């Protein structure tokens, strides 16, 4: 036996360290044993007494959720009394039998029965389980008067969320629902309130994004329980802190009108105050009734909303991303002026198309516009002018100008799923498509097609910035608990006054000069002049063959391949107050579809009520008067009038 | 007898292995698990639903797995140790990026029949990997800085990922378990002294970081530390847990209130009464006699495991046994210290008693490895 070998093997064994470690383990266990003795033997009497006192249980009290108001103080999310029925299993005796009896008084669907059974099995016998909610007063009274036959059943009055304007504000306020696992996943430190079964939490809209503000904090009620855990009496309570009320910048009258005016189209309309960024109306159609979700939406309704091609669940105003089409031309014009690649008076000849590397880029007008300068390029929305200008100035300058005017930016407003849109540049295309930027891409971007994407809110911000010359940002919260939200005075944009003035003149010409693309949608009142820009953005490629054979009219295409109709504008022209942006998804032409809506919504905002007939162009007055009279007649006789296309009432 | 004569060849083969099983250890595990079923039955208000029945099913599966693992030669487990470590690490990374989240932490992957928590599996894999490393390494080199750095890296990678989940309890358990393997392997004591000093320094830095721009822990974690020091700060949150659990323990007294008679836990004063805080129910219902008995059973398991480790002449087998025994030891000591208010509340369950699928299966698997090391020890 070689000694070295033996010592090596000894060294490989862990005897000494093992014994040392075992000693440490026994030491730690000794400390635990000593602590057990200390708690359970030495201080046992003390803890017994505390345990007796523990008969005083602390219950959480739900704070009232903050309310949501519009800018004039009209409530749009309120807490309403909720008549509900709870049941305590251990008092019911045979719970199934009592539920059967209850089912004869009020309707209990099989799914609800299954949920009640599940809740009862999961909770201790003395915990009340909600059996039915949102009962009518009649049902509630019926159950109350039959209480003796229903042991363990307790009628209760709680609070539930209600949205009086239903779908008018659906996308903005959102709704609340019982807190779920996925809600918990988003929280670092869940509020103790969520221990209350089915506690409501904001699921979407302002309810979700301002959840912490609206929720408040838990109160406590000290109650004495007997050894079975049943409540004997309340010893004291602390009501907690109610949630804070939120006042939005929206105006209910205008919001309702905008929703109504969009009708059953898939569309969005936004009105913003150009002076401070207050969003006065933010309509997205079609909408949904948030009250359906509070009460537990039926599968049928849910599937109807989910599978609708018009996407009623999406807030198109902030979540939609559309090619801005010709409404992007102001950006290109300002970029070109900043780089001084074209003088405002310089003309570009439009033969109806633009040649680049053997490829033809077409103007929307087949025969061409002839010679156009900057103002006329906006007025007629000449595409060739912008192909030329975009080529001269390049994509990087256009992207920088778009950013300056608020495009491609995500604003800090408490709404979920806000789209950033897309302001492309060379680096973007390289990164995402791994391809070099082509001059053709610049040309497409020059008329707001190709990669460029904007949300209606971004277009409204862009228009506000052009109208005011200031870096306006949107806001939808006016005050919290009556404390006004501070608005920082917006910076003046670094754009030459003469240049921005030219663009404004162009936008004036679009609406107020004959042959302007939105001339039919002008406001005749001299104090309320509307300036704007139409846009018709293509969602399909037009082939050479199709162009030769004659472009297919929108009406002959399936809905989802038709053009988007857009209009952005502001008024009054000489003293801007409001900016408006309208997008009608696959609606057709900007001048025929979007501009009239924008004009009507803008007039509502300007006049605060039904605009006078004199504000309409003379040619339209008779038609409008007729429509109003028919609507009045219909209201009197109670027969619903055919949906009027122009303004009504 | 000579060490030269020792070898694996004399290990039992086939079904005869059953006679070389560490039966006392097995019976003690059975006793602890049975205590667990009883307590889960009690906290459910005298019902096998929803916890006790499910726990028994998993126990049955786990026991079968334990015998299976025990019957396979420890040499095989040595060979798969690196693979087990790498697979566990990949799973940890997968859960970091794609895992399901629950209560603010990303911990598990849904594998259909159960929710797999890679961090639990890692507790075993890490011990295996470190034991293999020290078995391979020349004992003369164990204290050389470079050869100390390597196991530290093996240990710290999973610890960092578990901290990201964030699961402080498991991260501490991993680090302590790994540390014990290094200690048993004979790494110079000076390293441990330095590590303790560095740990102390780190705690100071972390506490100082609060409110600074480089704040290390999340605000709620600082609040937990505060409420540990002064439970009255948060009477509805974690401070409440500790106060209530101490009251429940203390009111059990010497002999307890009797099975299913615990008022504190039954009245819902206690949160997580079926998982991390289940010991309080036992202590209240069976008093000091009950809780010290459970502690003694745990002690006996720890001692049996360590004796088996010390007596095993195979270095890998000894280190695995000692390391897994240490993980088990940290499980119950940290949990008990936590409910008795000796250390802050970190989520560590009471081994084989608390309700929980992965933990139960992993622990029984670990005991399978300990048994395998015992059965196949060189004689």
Image (spheres, coloured by chain):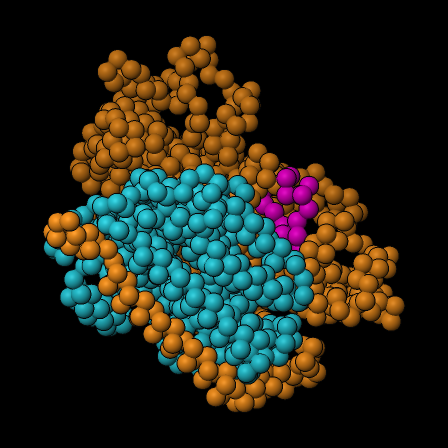
Chain colours: A orange, B cyan
| Chain part drawn in magenta | A286-304
* Residue A193 highlighted magenta (yes or no): no
Q: Between residues B110 and B45, which one lies in front from this camera angle? A: B45
Q: Between residues A31 and B140, which one lies in front from this camera angle? A: B140
B87 over B259 or under it: above or below = above
> Quadrant of residue A10 in the image?
bottom left
> Quadrant of residue A443 in the image?
top left
Q: Between residues B240 and A615, which one lies in front from this camera angle? A: B240
* Residue A289 highlighted magenta (yes or no): yes
Name the residue located 55 percent from the left edge and 27 percent from the top edge.
A559
Percent coordinates x, y for residue A608 in the rendering: 54, 56
Name the residue located 36 percent from the left edge and 57 percent from the top edge.
B308
Outermost residue toward the front? Answer: B1
Q: Is residue B137 visible?
A: yes
A599 over A124 or under it: above or below = above
Name the residue located 56 percent from the left edge and 72 percent from the top edge.
B281
Q: In screen coordinates, is A647 left or right of A373?
A: right
Q: Between residues A277 and A611, which one lies in front from this camera angle? A: A277
Percent coordinates x, y for residue B359 in the rendering: 46, 54
Percent coordinates x, y for residue B106 in the rendering: 42, 52
A335 over B129 or under it: above or below = above
Percent coordinates x, y for residue B195 in the rendering: 20, 65
Name the residue located 22 percent from the left edge and 38 percent from the top edge.
A397
């Amino acid at each position: 036996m070689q000694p070295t070998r033996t010592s090596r093997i000894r060294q490989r064994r862990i005897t000494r360290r093992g014994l040392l470690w075992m000693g440490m383990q026994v030491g730690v266990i000794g400390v635990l044993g000593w602590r057990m003795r200390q708690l359970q033997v030495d201080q046992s009497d003390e803890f017994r007494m505390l345990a007796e006192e523990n008969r005083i249980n602390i219950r959480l009290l739900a704070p009232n959720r903050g309310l949501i108001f519009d800018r004039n103080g009209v409530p749009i999310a309120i807490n309403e009394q909720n008549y509900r029925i709870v049941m305590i299993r251990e008092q019911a005796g045979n719970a199934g039998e009592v539920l059967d009896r209850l089912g004869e008084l009020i309707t209990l669907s099989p799914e609800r029965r299954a949920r009640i059974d599940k809740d009862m099995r999961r909770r201790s016998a003395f915990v009340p389980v909600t059996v039915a909610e949102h009962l009518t007063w009649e049902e509630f009274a019926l159950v109350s008067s039959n209480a003796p036959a229903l042991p363990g059943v307790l009628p209760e009055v709680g609070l539930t969320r209600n949205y009086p304007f239903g779908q008018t504000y659906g996308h903005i306020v959102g709704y609340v629902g019982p807190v779920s696992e996925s809600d918990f996943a988003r929280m670092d430190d869940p509020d103790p309130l969520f221990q209350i079964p089915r506690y409501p939490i904001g699921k979407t809209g302002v309810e979700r994004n301002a959840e912490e503000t609206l929720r408040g904090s838990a109160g406590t009620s000290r109650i004495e329980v007997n050894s079975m855990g049943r409540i004997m009496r309340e010893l004291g309570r602390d009501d907690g802190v109610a949630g804070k009320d939120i006042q939005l910048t929206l105006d209910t009258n205008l919001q309702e009108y905008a929703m109504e005016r969009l009708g059953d189209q898939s569309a969005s309309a936004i009105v913003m105050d150009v002076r401070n960024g207050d969003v006065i109306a933010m309509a997205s159609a079609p909408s949904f009734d948030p009250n359906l979700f509070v009460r537990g939406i039926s599968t049928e309704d849910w599937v109807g909303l989910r599978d609708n091609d018009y996407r009623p669940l999406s807030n198109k105003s902030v979540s939609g991303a559309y090619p801005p089409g010709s409404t992007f031309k102001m950006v290109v014009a300002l970029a070109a002026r900043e780089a001084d690649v074209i003088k405002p008076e310089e003309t570009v000849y439009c033969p109806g198309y633009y040649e680049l590397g053997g490829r033809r880029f077409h103007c929307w007008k087949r025969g061409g516009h002839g010679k156009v300068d900057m103002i006329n390029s906006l007025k007629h929305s000449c595409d060739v002018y912008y192909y030329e200008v975009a080529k001269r100035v390049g994509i990087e300058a256009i992207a920088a100008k778009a950013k300056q005017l608020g495009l491609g930016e995500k604003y800090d407003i408490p709404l979920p799923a806000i789209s950033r849109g897309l302001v492309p540049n060379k680096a973007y295309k390289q990164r995402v498509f791994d391809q070099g930027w082509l001059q053709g891409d610049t040309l497409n971007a020059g008329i707001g097609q190709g990669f460029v994407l904007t949300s209606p809110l971004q277009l409204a911000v862009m228009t506000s910035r052009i109208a005011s010359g200031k870096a306006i940002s949107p806001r939808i919260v006016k005050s919290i608990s009556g404390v006004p939200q501070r608005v920082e005075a917006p910076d003046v944009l670094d754009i030459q006054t003469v240049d921005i003035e030219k663009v404004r003149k162009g936008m004036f010409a679009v609406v107020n000069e004959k042959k302007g693309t939105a001339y039919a949608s002008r406001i005749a009142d001299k104090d309320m002049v509307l300036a704007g820009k139409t846009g018709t953005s293509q969602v399909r490629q037009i082939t050479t063959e199709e162009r030769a054979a004659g472009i297919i009219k929108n009406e002959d295409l399936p809905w989802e391949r038709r053009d988007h109709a857009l209009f952005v504008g502001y008024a009054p022209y000489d003293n801007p107050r409001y900016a408006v942006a309208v997008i009608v998804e696959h609606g057709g032409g900007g001048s025929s579809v979007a501009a009239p809506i924008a004009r009507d919504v803008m007039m509502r905002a300007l006049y605060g009520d039904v605009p006078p007939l004199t504000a309409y162009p003379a040619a339209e007055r008779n038609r409008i008067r007729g429509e109003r009279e028919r609507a009045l007649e219909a209201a009197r006789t109670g027969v619903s009038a055919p949906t009027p296309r122009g303004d009504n009432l | 007898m000579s060490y030269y004569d020792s070898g694996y060849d004399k290990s039992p083969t086939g079904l005869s292995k059953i006679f070389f099983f560490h039966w006392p250890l097995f019976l003690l595990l059975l006793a602890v698990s049975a205590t667990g079923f009883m307590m889960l039955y009690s906290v459910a208000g005298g019902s096998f639903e929803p916890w006790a029945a499910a726990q028994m099913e998993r126990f049955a599966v786990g026991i079968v797995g334990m015998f299976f693992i025990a019957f396979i030669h420890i040499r095989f487990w040595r060979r798969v140790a690196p693979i087990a470590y790498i697979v566990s690490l990949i799973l940890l990374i997968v859960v970091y990026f794609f895992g399901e989240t629950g209560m603010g932490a990303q911990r598990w992957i849904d594998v259909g029949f159960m929710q797999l928590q890679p961090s639990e599996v890692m507790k075993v894999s890490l011990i295996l990997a470190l034991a293999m490393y020290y078995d391979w390494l020349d004992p003369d080199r164990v204290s050389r800085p470079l050869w100390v750095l390597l196991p530290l890296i093996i240990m710290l990678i999973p610890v960092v990922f578990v901290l990201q989940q964030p699961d402080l309890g498991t991260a501490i358990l991993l680090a302590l378990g790994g540390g014990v393997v290094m200690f048993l392997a004979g790494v110079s004591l000076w390293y441990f002294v330095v590590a303790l000093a560095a740990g102390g320094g780190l705690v100071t830095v972390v506490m100082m970081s609060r409110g600074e721009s480089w704040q290390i822990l999340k605000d709620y974690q600082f609040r937990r530390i505060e409420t540990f020091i002064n439970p009255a700060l948060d009477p509805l949150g974690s401070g409440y847990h500790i106060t209530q659990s101490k009251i429940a323990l203390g009111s059990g007294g010497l002999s307890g209130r009797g099975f299913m008679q615990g008022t504190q836990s039954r009245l819902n004063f206690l949160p997580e009464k079926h998982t991390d805080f289940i010991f309080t129910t036992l202590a209240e219902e069976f008093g000091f006699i009950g809780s010290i008995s459970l502690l003694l059973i745990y002690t006996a398991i720890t001692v049996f495991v360590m004796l088996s480790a010390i007596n095993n002449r195979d270095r890998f087998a000894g280190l695995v046994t000692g390391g897994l025994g240490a993980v088990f030891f940290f499980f119950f000591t940290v949990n008990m210290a936590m409910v008795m208010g000796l250390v802050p509340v970190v989520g560590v369950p009471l081994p084989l008693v608390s309700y929980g699928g992965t933990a139960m299966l992993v622990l029984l698997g670990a005991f399978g490895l300990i048994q395998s090391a015992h059965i196949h020890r060189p004689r």
